[in-house]
Image (tube, helix red, strand yellow):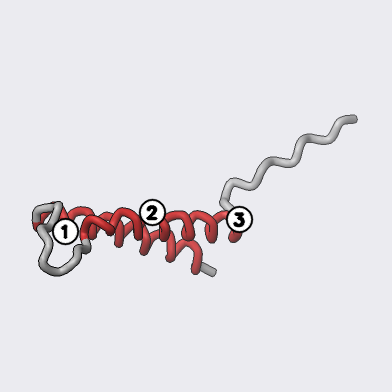
Amino acid sequence: MISPAVPEPILPTRHQLRDLHDFIDGQAYAALGPVTRVPGTAHPLRGEERAVVSNAVNALFAASRHLYQAP
């Protein structure tokens, strides 16, 4: 008799969550580059555009941190 195959785990491993968090951290830093600027230079994004980018990046970063740090 052939035993059934062991199903793959549905949830990601802690290592995968850490890798995802690290990836999002790097992408968040890159995405926030246009949001920060050198004082005295023109800003490439309008105020509401900066806020949208910043809020989206911060929310995604917070979600990945929560997943990684969850018990």
- Name the front one of labels 2 and 1: 2
Residue on which disc 1 sits: 51
Marks 2 and 3 sit apart, C-alpha to C-alpha, by 21 Å
Marks 1 and 3 sit apart, C-alpha to C-alpha, by 33 Å
Q: Is residue 64 left or right of residue 36?
A: right
Please tell me the numbered disc located at residue 22. none
Tag 2, which secondary structure?
Answer: helix
Q: Residue visible at 74% across and 41% down?
A: 6
Amino acid type, mark 2: Gln
Q: Earlier in the sequence, mark 2 or mark 3?
A: 3
Q: Quadrant of residue 28?
A: bottom left
Q: In this orientation, which residue lies closer to the viewer: 8 or 36?
A: 36
- Name the front one of labels 2 and 3: 2
Amino acid type, mark 3: Thr
Tag 1, which secondary structure?
Answer: helix
- Mark 1 surroundings within 10 Å by alpha-carbon count, few (fewer than 14), some (14 through 19), many (20 or more): few
- As drawn, 32 above or below 10: below
Q: Residue furthest front?
A: 40
Residue on which disc 3 sits: 13
Q: Is residue 53 left or right of residue 68?
A: left
Please tell me the numbered disc located at residue 27. 2
Q: Earlier in the sequence, mark 2 or mark 1?
A: 2
